[in-house]
């Protein structure tokens, strides 16, 4: 019997629908005749889904309980978090309490191979803009995994040179100096790449809004022309291969 695969995402919105649909198709194509179930951890999103009665089970905990009631003893739970930070560890606590034995698929950026593969996924966007600084912006965290942003910058600079910058919209690491650094190095153009699975609220509010504190406004105040990629990592070709590899690794360890 093939183990069911639970895909654990933050939440589903109209902006996320295209991303999740594309990833879902790729996963189903690679694991045919396997029960693929999506779970969402956002309290706001799960409340909305419950109110609309789109599903009786939408959180990872609810879905695991539902599978247990069906007599399922094992399942694969694949995280769609970018890093193994606070939300991922919350997921581990949930799976650890389940009566179902769960094999965990690790977040997208966990191993050196993952970091290298993300670099190759971003290569087309970066290589097509040789005259621009490349600014990759993620969420940020107060979890010890915050150092991963520095690691990503180091790895990408090894691939593409010193014009790569990795910043965050809140929490750690402190990357407030990056705008001045880009300007002081003489760049007149920058391309922003969202380091989010989906370019949602943080992209619109913290990266490209007209608010004076947004990254775009701060760059423009230094007379730097800004181009922003308007989609998240989930829609870059090849991202699905990392997810499929992690599911395969989790499945292998569970057998």
Image (tube, rainbow, N blue to C red):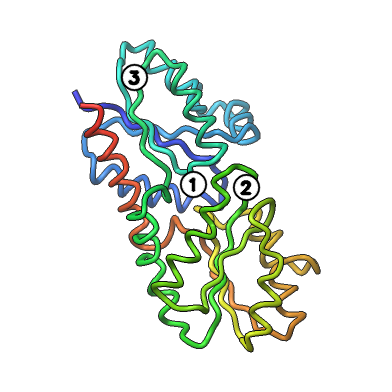
User: Observer-nearest residue: 144 or 19?
Assistant: 144
Contact? badges 3 and 2 (CB < 8 Å) = no
Identify which residue is drawn at 31% across, 16% down. Answer: 72
User: Observer-nearest residue: 54 or 20?
Assistant: 20
User: Observer-nearest residue: 24 or 95?
Assistant: 95
Report which residue position mark 2 lands on: 141
Q: Position of residue 125 (x, y in %)?
A: 44, 74
User: Is residue 66 left or right of 185 when viewed as pictured?
Assistant: left
Report which residue position mark 3 lands on: 101
Q: Position of residue 20 (x, y in %)?
A: 44, 47
Q: Is residue 129 above or below residue 75?
A: below
Q: Position of residue 168 (x, y in %)?
A: 63, 59
Q: Is residue 205 above or below residue 54?
A: below
User: Is residue 135 left or right of 63 when viewed as pictured?
Assistant: right
Identify which residue is drawn at 39% across, 60% down. Answer: 118
N-term mark: 3 or 1:
1
Q: Residues within 10 Å of mark 2 (few under 14, many from 20)?
A: some
Report which residue position mark 1 lands on: 83
N-term mark: 2 or 1:
1
User: Is residue 55 left or right of 188 when viewed as pictured?
Assistant: left
Q: Residues within 10 Å of mark 1 (few under 14, many from 20)?
A: many
Q: Residues within 10 Å of mark 3 (few under 14, many from 20)?
A: some
Identify which residue is drawn at 25% across, 40% down. Answer: 248
Identify which residue is drawn at 36% across, 16% down. Answer: 100
Contact? badges 2 and 1 (CB < 8 Å) = yes
* Inter-mark Cα distance, 3 to 1: 23 Å
* Inter-mark Cα distance, 2 to 1: 10 Å
Indicate the quadrant containing the C terminus: top left, top right, bottom left or bottom right: top left
């Amino acid at each position: 019997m093939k183990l069911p695969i639970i895909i654990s995402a933050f939440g589903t919105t109209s902006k996320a629908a295209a991303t999740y649909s594309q990833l879902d198709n790729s996963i189903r194509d690679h694991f045919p005749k396997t029960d693929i179930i999506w779970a969402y951890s956002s309290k706001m999103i799960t409340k909305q889904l419950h109110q609309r009665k789109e599903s009786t089970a939408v959180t990872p905990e609810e879905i695991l309980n539902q599978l247990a009631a069906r007599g399922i003893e094992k399942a694969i739970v694949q995280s769609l978090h970018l890093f193994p930070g606070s939300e991922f560890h919350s997921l581990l606590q949930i799976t650890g309490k389940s009566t179902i034995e769960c094999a965990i698929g690790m977040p997208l950026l966990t191993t050196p191979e993952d970091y290298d593969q993300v670099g190759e996924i971003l290569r087309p966007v970066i290589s097509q803009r040789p005259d621009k600084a490349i600014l990759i912006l993620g969420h940020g965290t107060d979890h010890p995994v915050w150092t991963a942003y520095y690691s990503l910058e180091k790895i990408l600079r090894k691939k593409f040179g010193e014009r790569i910058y990795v910043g965050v919209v809140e929490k750690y690491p402190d990357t407030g100096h990056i705008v001045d650094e880009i300007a002081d190095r003489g760049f007149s153009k920058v391309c922003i790449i969202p380091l989010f699975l989906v370019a949602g609220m943080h992209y619109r509010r913290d990266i490209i809004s007209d608010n004076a504190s947004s990254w775009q406004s701060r760059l423009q105040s230094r007379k730097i022309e800004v181009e922003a990629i308007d989609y998240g990592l989930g829609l870059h070709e090849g991202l699905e291969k990392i997810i499929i590899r992690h599911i395969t690794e989790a499945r292998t360890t569970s057998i």
